[in-house]
Amino acid sequence: MRSTLLLLFVMLLFAAPASAAPQLDWTPCKPGFECATAKVPLDYDHPSGRKIELALTRARAADPATRIGSVFVHNGGPGASNVDFIQAAPPQAIAAITRRYDVIGIDTRGSGHSRPLVDCKVDQERTGLYSQPFGPAAAARAPAYVRHCTQRNRDLIDHMSSADVARDLDRLRAAVGDDRLNLIGHSYGTFVGATYASMFPAHTGRMVLDSPMDAETWVHRPFTAVREQSAALEHALDRFFAATAFSEAAFDELVARLNRNPLGDLDGNDVLIAAMFVTSPREWPDFKDALEHAQQGDGRPLRAMTDQFYSGRLIGFDLAFVEQAVDQQYPHRVGPFLRAGFHAAALFDHFGLQNGFAELPFGLLPASDADAYHGPFRNSYAAPPALVIGTTHDPYTPYTWAQRLTADLGNARLLTYNGDGHGAVTDLNPCIVGTMLAYLEAGVLPPTGASCDQVL
């Protein structure tokens, strides 16, 4: 009883009504889409104070007479542009959802086309969050990176938590006239979705949480979460070796050779970054081809993959740094990061690079968002059940995270996707898409233990 009362108190504390919904003046932009800008408070403790601007795009429901409402899309990152993602999505994917919904992409605070941007003004490959070379040198670069980010984003960094993103979403929900927020969240977008459901149980609608984060571990045991992610990346690389017959020995020899003698501006660290960027079996043939080109003296294909990683297409690194620093409960001492780094180096042959040493900036950022939400992560039984989709061989969000998030949310159903890659919905698998649409349009959940098989 005491724990139930505490949970209700936390929900009431954070679920203050999101008054003063922003005015949205939708205007045509790209063919088939409208765009708008929403003004929301920078600091929700002072809602009448300074405003920031959020960029949105919308594809309208095909038939207004059968329209259910709006569904917001958060494609993860954090920091990638959801506006660009929606506008570049395959037309058949947009058409499937707009049978009954308006589809809305939002560039969350500080990202994409929203203003102001979180921008640390650094060369991401040389001095940024996941800059090279990896290992202890990354820890040595961390203080300078944190100083750059703090000096250039001082007004923003205390207001960049996923809880603030959830508050923004609640205002936008009201602005489009919906009683409940419907959301398709992918990767980090599932963390935002779990946060929203926990903070605004009375306003939570149908949520599709694809390739989900384990919110509790991510927040309270971040070193553990990153180690589990590294293990998933190692597993995915092993599956690449098995599927393509490009041997691990040949891969390791190429990395070592390029670290000794770079091929132009391609070294071994770049090969590891390119391997992290390969998220789908559909990309394996191109990656194998790029590796073979490098073996033969042509580093351009691998270099292009590395450049894509650092371009911010998947992650807005500076925003990811600030948002994760206030979301996750990292220690504020250097020692634990160094120990985590050396531990990861002993555990992982290829992907220990993101552990410990590279995490140090999260612990050094002099920011504290007093209004951040750190759990518990629950989906109220007064809300519709959430549909959680976990991929068995996901390189970024391991399948066990989907199982844990489903258990933590309580009012949720897990759909297993038997396959490889990061993102079941974006695979456009007929079983996954059909199950998602049945849920979004009619509230029909798959049976307990249901699964879909990947078709390549």
Image (spheres, rainbow, N blue to C red):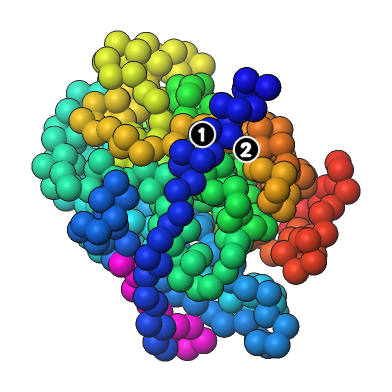
- Residue 325 in percent (x, y) is at 33, 34
Residue designated by label 1? 10
Residue 30 spot, x, y in % from top left: 43, 85
Span highlighted in magenta in the image: 30-39
Q: Quadrant of residue 132?
A: top left
Residue shown at 27% from the left, 15% from the top: 333
- In this rendering, which labeled residue sits more in front, label 1 or label 2? 1
Q: Nearer the viewer, residue 307 or 325?
A: 325
Q: Mark number for residue 379?
A: none
Q: Earlier in the sequence, mark 1 or mark 2?
A: 1
Q: Is 234 drawn above or below residue 148 in the view shown?
A: above
Q: Nearer the viewer, residue 86 or 442?
A: 442
- Residue 161 place in picture, x, y as percent: 37, 43
Q: Residue furthest right?
A: 447
Going by the numbered disc 2, the residue's amino acid type is Arg
- In which quadrant is the N terminus drawn? top right
**Numbered tag placed on residue 378 in the rendering:** 2
Name the quarter where the C terminus is drawn: bottom right
Q: Main secondary structure of the magenta part?
A: strand
Up-down: is 114 above or below 161? below
Q: CA distance from mark 1 to mark 2?
A: 11 Å
